[in-house]
Image (cartoon, rainbow, N blue to C red):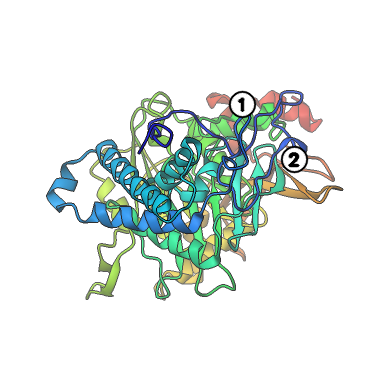
Amino acid sequence: MDERTTMDLADPTALPLFAPSPTRNGKPPGPEHVTTMPATTAWPPVGKEESSHDSAPLDWQLIATLRQQASNRLSEMPQDERSRLAPQDLREKGRSIILALLEDESAARVTAGEDSWTAREQHLMARALEDALFGLGRFQPLVDDTRVENITILGHDRVTLELSDGQLVPGPAVADSDQELIDFLVFLASRSEVNARPFSEAQPSLHLRLDGGARLAAAAFVTPRPQVVIRRHGMREVSLEDFVADNRLSPVAASFLRACVRAGKSIVVSGAQGAGKTTGARALAAEIPPHEAIGTFETEYELHLHEMPERHPLCMAWEARPGSGERGPDGRQAGEYTLTAALIDSFRFNLSRQIVGEVRGHEVLAMLKAMESGAGSICTTHAKNAEGAIGKLVTCAMEAGAHVTHEYAIRTIAKNIDIIVHVHLETTPLPDGTAQRDRWISEIITVEPGERDPGYATNSVFRTVGDARIATPNVLPDDYRELEAWGFDLDGYFRADGGPS
């Protein structure tokens, strides 16, 4: 290529999805400051004057074709040669393939009498092609933007973004067609050599951990249109103090939860989808003393405690792996690695605490085993309120097999769970057609076995009253007064309750 069309793939200049905009009162910008890109544009124009030719939309069909060609060329490399390459070296190899493909395509355009690409267009094409081959394709600028918390996709052109301040705003299209979106999801799921996941008509659901820690959940083939949710975990090194500062939790309630963690109480964080349960679990885990060895067990890494060595220097992480093909005599598919198997393996690692990230189904057995085996386990589950989490876990346990009876499930859960913390999510429609989401801890209850139906007893230690958005003291069981030795502000609890100190 001549000087005009040569471009540098190593250009570190980041092109964010949203144009930079000022903050208001120290808060992230609202929807009026967000530039939503057209469906045909992957990268916004930069701040310099450009010709109309420079600002033409990218040809995503061509990018998809070139991505497949680049993937095929990488696959043609001998396996032993590929295995010797570090990830960055493999990416450099991919970049050289991308440049070669773009050179060929540029030459073909000139031969056909079409205008050659400008350096700007080639740069955008190469960046988009590299994202498609090694990154998240047209998802990438959305995931890279720090103001985007969650991405909801209901078909290639129906995208909603939840910003970090809770606002819901429309986003750009992520493909030119639903089939293109499905094809990319299939490629994304199969690309990992470490933990590849099937996604096909035979396996119509996909749960995938993305580079950078985001989580992707997708469904197709059994839905009217492909459905995708990407959750970014922006608040990783979060603490109970952050919850207090954001007015999601009172200082007294924070002291209670801190004392519960340090005293080795087992805690379940409940809430609706997207309520911030994982963030709450991270804040609780931040109170675990750094000298304790902890293990995390997740279907996809979400807690990321093992990536915080300053806070959790002795953290070991396990991730489940789905199998493929027919099931063997033991009922497992080839390559399957369950949370229960991981938990059993972990008993030789001298752990102080075992934390099961999220319970949606059979994971409940691993959670109960973790709570029975050590002190101070933490997990999350979906429920509409704190007590509802007990019923949810009982149902999950009974679905694990006929050997788990209702009585056994209740008895075991009530015996091993000490505290349930409920995170409330409220969505308020706004006059401009967008919406605002707010989250706070609305309930903290204690759980203990009970002789009468339903087989357990609860006490609401903190609860919200009326339209309040912060949980206040209610009833404290006598044996929880002992938490004062672990830092619980007992005097503050009774002063806030209006009773004697």
Name the front one of labels 2 and 1. Answer: 2
Residue 209 vs 454, above or below: the answer is above
| Distance between the alpha carbons at the discs numbered 2 and 1 | 28 Å
Q: Quadrant of residue 283?
A: top right
Residue 94 vs 24, above or below: the answer is below
Q: Position of residue 214 (x, y in %)?
A: 48, 45
10 Å crowding of disc 1: few (<14), some (14-19), many (20+): some
Residue corresponding to mark 2: 31
Residue corresponding to mark 1: 241
Type of amino acid at the residue the image marks with label 1: Glu
Label for residue 209?
none
Q: Position of residue 136 (x, y in %)?
A: 45, 48
Q: Furthest-left residue in view? A: 80
Residue 156 vs 81, above or below: the answer is below
| Residue found 45% across the figure and 56% down from its top | 62
Q: Position of residue 464 (x, y in %)?
A: 77, 43
Q: Position of residue 238 (x, y in %)?
A: 55, 31
